[in-house]
Image (cartoon, rainbow, N blue to C red):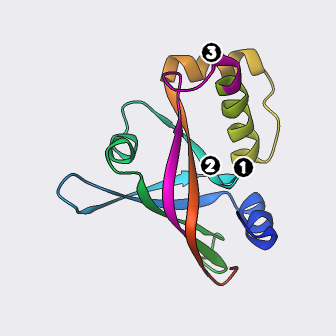
Amino acid sequence: MLPEKVKDFAAQTHRGVLTTFRRNGAAQMSILSCGPYRDGIAFTVTESRVKLKNLRRDPRCTLMVSAENWRPFVVLEGRATILSADNTDPEEFKTALRDAYRTCSGEEHSNWEEYDQAMRDDRRSVIIVVPDHIYGTVA
C-alpha cells in the first residue's frame, strides 16, 4: 500500500526512472511517465520494449519518482504486476489502460476511442510497480 504522501507526490510529478534486470543480472534503466495506481505506481509500455521483456522474466524492479530538479524524490523497490491483453479481461484491460493514461498525465484524453485504438496498435501493457520497500525524501 502506498502512503498518501507518496500517492500525492507521484500524482503531481509524473517523472520516473525504472530499473529492471537483464538476463545477465546487469541493471537496465528507463525513463518514463508514471502515476499512482491501485497499490503502486503505474505506467504503460509497448510490447517490444526491453523493460517489459525483463519484467516478464524477472518482476523485481526499482522505480524512482522525482521532481524535475531531482528533489524531492521517492524510490519504490518491489515487483511489477503486468496487465496485458493476454492475461486481463478485455474490459478490465481497457479500463486499466485509460486509468494509466489519467494517472500518468494528470488529465483526460480528448478522444478515448482513438486512444484505445493506439493502445491496441502499440500492443501496450500496463505495469504496476508494487513496493516492498519505500524510501527517499518523500517517504
**Where is mark 3, residue-wise?**
117
Mark 3: which secondary structure?
A: helix
Judge whether 44 appears above or below 86 on screen. Answer: below
Kind of residue sitting beneath label 2:
Ala
Residue beneath disc 1: 38
Q: Is residue 94 above or below residue 43?
A: above
Say above or below: 89 vs 65. Answer: above
Q: Nearer the viewer, residue 107 or 62?
A: 62
- Say what secondary structure mark 2 lies in: strand
Residue at x 70% of width, y 79% of height = 138
Name the disc covering residue 42, or none: 2
Q: Amino acid at mark 3?
A: Gln
Q: Are marks 1 and 2 in contact (CB under 8 Å)?
A: yes
Determine the CA span between mark 2 and mark 3.
20 Å
User: Is the residue 133 above or below the residue 80 in the image?
Assistant: below
Q: CA distance from mark 1 to mark 3?
A: 24 Å
- Residue 82 place in picture, x, y as percent: 51, 40
Which of label 1 and label 2 is nearer to you?
1
Residue 33: x and y in percent read: 60, 51
Q: Is residue 128 magenta?
A: no
First along the sequence among labels 2 and 3: 2
Say which of marks 1 and 3 sits in front: 1
Residue 21, position in %: x, y?
31, 57
Q: Which residues are magenta?
A: 76-92
Residue at screen point 22% across, 61% down: 25
Residue at the image point whose x is 48% and y is 22% from the top: 86
